[in-house]
Image (tube, helix red, strand yellow):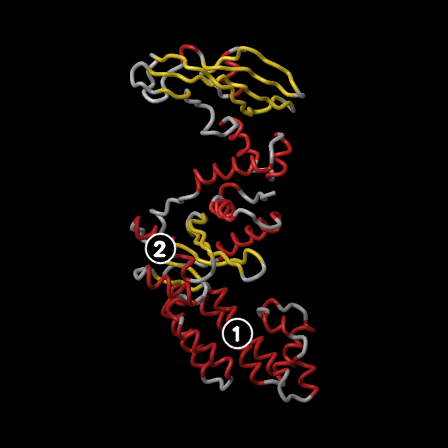
Amino acid sequence: MDVSFMYHGFGLRTVECSRTDYKDNGIVLNVQTREDKLCCPACKSRKVIRNGYTIRRFRCVPIGHKPVYMDMRVQRVKCSVCGCDQQEHIPFSTGKRHTTHRLERLVVDLMKMMTISETAAYLGLSWSTVKDIHKNHLQHNYASPDIRQVRFIGIDEFAVRKGHVYKTIVVDLETGHIIHVGDGKGADALDGFWRRVKKWKVNIEHVATDLSAAFISAVRKNLPGAQLVFDHFHVKKIINDTVDKLRRSLYHSKLHEGQRDVIKGIRWLLLKNGEDIKTEAARKQLEEALKVNEPLAKAYYLKEKITLVWGQLDKHAARIWLYDWIREAIRSDVTQIATAGMSMFKHREGILAWYDRRITTAMVEGINNKIKVMKREAYGFTDDHYFKLRLLSLHDTGITSFL
């Protein structure tokens, strides 16, 4: 077979084909290293003596729908220069694998558009072979993300499966790349990331996160010079949860039947932004509920007012607005609202830090949604390390499933 065809078709530079067989609906190439390319695997000297051989079979890229196999005569050589006595080096495959580099590249390319099962079926390979090829590729290219230029990060956790099994991810907010995946949702999930930060002396300036006490303490301990920026979606969620808890407690308190009927069924009206309530009937229902219950009216008013903290002209104006909100909440004489007010006071600097660097965890939440799609397609994971590698490569490989 022509040497040029062997190179352009299969990526084989140093071998020659002595015979082609057609067996079991496949093509078998019988090859060996060209005489002028046979050398010592240690010192590369051409002064070698043949010392026996063995036959190894490799899978190559298919021709059409026909699988292509390569039976290679692997020569054992003894070097006259360095004395090395071992098998020749095989440049088109790695270690003890039975696939060529060209086929492995094809697998990686197909995995950007297909699932493992689909790729395996298309190429006539086993599921585990395709997965191992892809895992080796991800390990080589994505296992250790370069974090030296990272300045702004977002931290969040997601549930891997039911039963309180979580993972924590760190995202570079400038590139959208996941740069760390940790087990659990506590401070220890970030230990590996902090070690890399210290090793490379990374200058992280701002960290966007929710109000998780574990994340806050971990950032303050390991990045004392970084500024925490609390995501305003999670800040609003605290107020929304407060309103909802108050509604439930009022419903079960000593209200007469008429008041209870008015409060019942208005949960989503309370949690919606006022401007998003479009119908007149819905607005009227909300107004009636607030009219008959003063604590609920106070909570709703403060819930609407908190959103304006992020709509001020500058940080100074936002600080005045937030402090005014906190005073109203604490003086409201409603326990749930006062507690929320104290929480806002505790986290005030992180809330106002948004005016110094307008970052949020929205990008991280978007990535979490992609992960949910990946998990839904996967039907569970048997290889946790492979799952982490898929997360680290999510920006490049897109959403492809594990099956």
**Could you tell whether 113 is left or right of 323 in the image?**
right
Mark 1 or mark 2: name the one nearer the start of the chain.
2
> How far from the left and from the top, in percent, is residue 49?
37, 12
> How far from the left and from the top, in percent, is residue 328?
46, 81
Give the amino acid type for the residue marked by disc 2 in the picture. Trp
User: Which residue: 57% across, 53% down?
Assistant: 372
The image quadrant where one finds the C terminus is top right
Q: Is residue 257 above or below residue 222?
A: below
- The kind of secondary structure element at disc 1 is helix
> How far from the left and from the top, in percent, is residue 290?
61, 81
Q: Separation of disc 1 and disc 2 at Cα?
A: 36 Å
Q: Residues within 10 Å of mark 1 (few under 14, many from 20)?
A: many
Give the amino acid type for the residue marked by disc 1 in the picture. Lys
Q: Residues within 10 Å of mark 2 (few under 14, many from 20)?
A: some
Q: Give the number of the disc on residue 303.
A: 1
Q: Which residue is mark 2?
A: 194
> How far from the left and from the top, in percent, is residue 252?
63, 83
Q: Is residue 273 above or below residue 7?
A: below
Residue closest to the eye, 305 or 14: 14
Total label count? 2
- The kind of secondary structure element at disc 2 is helix
User: Which residue: 34% across, 16% down?
Assistant: 79
The image quadrant where one finds the N terminus is top right
